Amino acid sequence: MWLGVLNATAYAVAMAYLESAIVVYLRRLYYPKGFDFPLVIIDIPTLLIEVGRETATIVMLATVGMAAGRTRVGKCAYFLYLFGVWDIFYYVWLKVFLDWPASLFTWDVLFLIPVPWVGPVLAPVTVALTMIGMALVLLYLEQRGPGFVFD
């Protein structure tokens, strides 16, 4: 189990690096004086590319989760784990690259699917930590075998 978790962690951290690097470039283009609200309205083609990028991110996390897990529960657990680690390290890398966010209470565009979500960075970090915890419990129970859950 732990080797799989270590491999999933490496993938999620590297993917978060890539995602945050893209956001660095977007912010340099659309927010040359620094990211802040109100949001700059971007053109529809760029918005569609961004929605596609977010969709691709979910597909990539899901397919790696499916490949890493042995059972349906394990596949779901790895997806949750990957998503959680990716989301936290996305903000870690933005802090490294841009010294942003200033705090966990800094507001951000959290996701674009199915509609734009905005809120403090603390919201996705809290959800991500919960996903990681749930995933580790599920992977532990999966390792123990099906009878363990009902004992």
Image (tube, grey):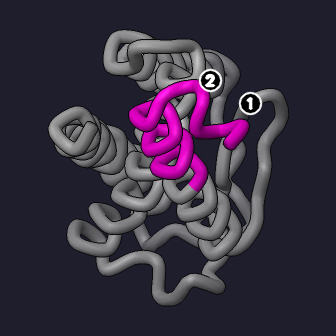
Q: Residue 150: which quarter of the image?
A: top right
Which label is found at residue 51? 2
Which mark sits nearer the N-terminus, 2 or 1? Answer: 2
Is 127 on the left or on the right of 34, as rendered?
right
* Magenta stretch in the rendered image: 134-151
Whether tag 2 and tag 1 are in contact, CB under 8 A, the answer is: yes
> What residue does disc 1 label?
113
Image height of 59 relative to 128, above or below? above
**Residue 117 at x, y percent in the picture:** 78, 50
Q: What type of secondary structure mainly makes up the magenta span?
A: helix
Q: Residue 25 at what x, y percent from top left?
A: 31, 46
Residue 143 locus on image (x, y percent) = 40, 33
Q: Is residue 149 magenta?
A: yes
Q: Quadrant of the N terminus?
A: top left
- Residue at x 50% of width, y 53% of height: 132
For residue 32, side relative to residue 123 (left or right): left
Query: How dense is the environment of label 1, judged by Cα within 10 Å: few (below 14), some, or many (20 and up)?
Result: few
Q: Residue furthest front?
A: 151
Q: Which residue is found at the position 48% from the left and 28% from the top?
A: 145
Image position, residue 55 (x, y; %)? 57, 19
Q: Residue at (44%, 44%) from the top-left corner?
A: 140
Up-down: is 49 above or below 92?
Answer: above
Q: Give the amino acid type for the residue marked by disc 2 in the picture.
A: Val
Position of residue 116 in the picture relative to residue 70 (left or right):
right
Left or right side of 68 for 2? left
For the residues labelled 2 and 1, the Cα–Cα distance comes to 7 Å
Pick whichever, 132 or 99, lies toward us.
132
Question: Mark 2 or mark 1, which is nearer to you?
Answer: 1
Residue at disc 1, secondary structure:
loop
Q: In this orientation, which residue lies closer to the viewer: 46 or 150?
A: 150
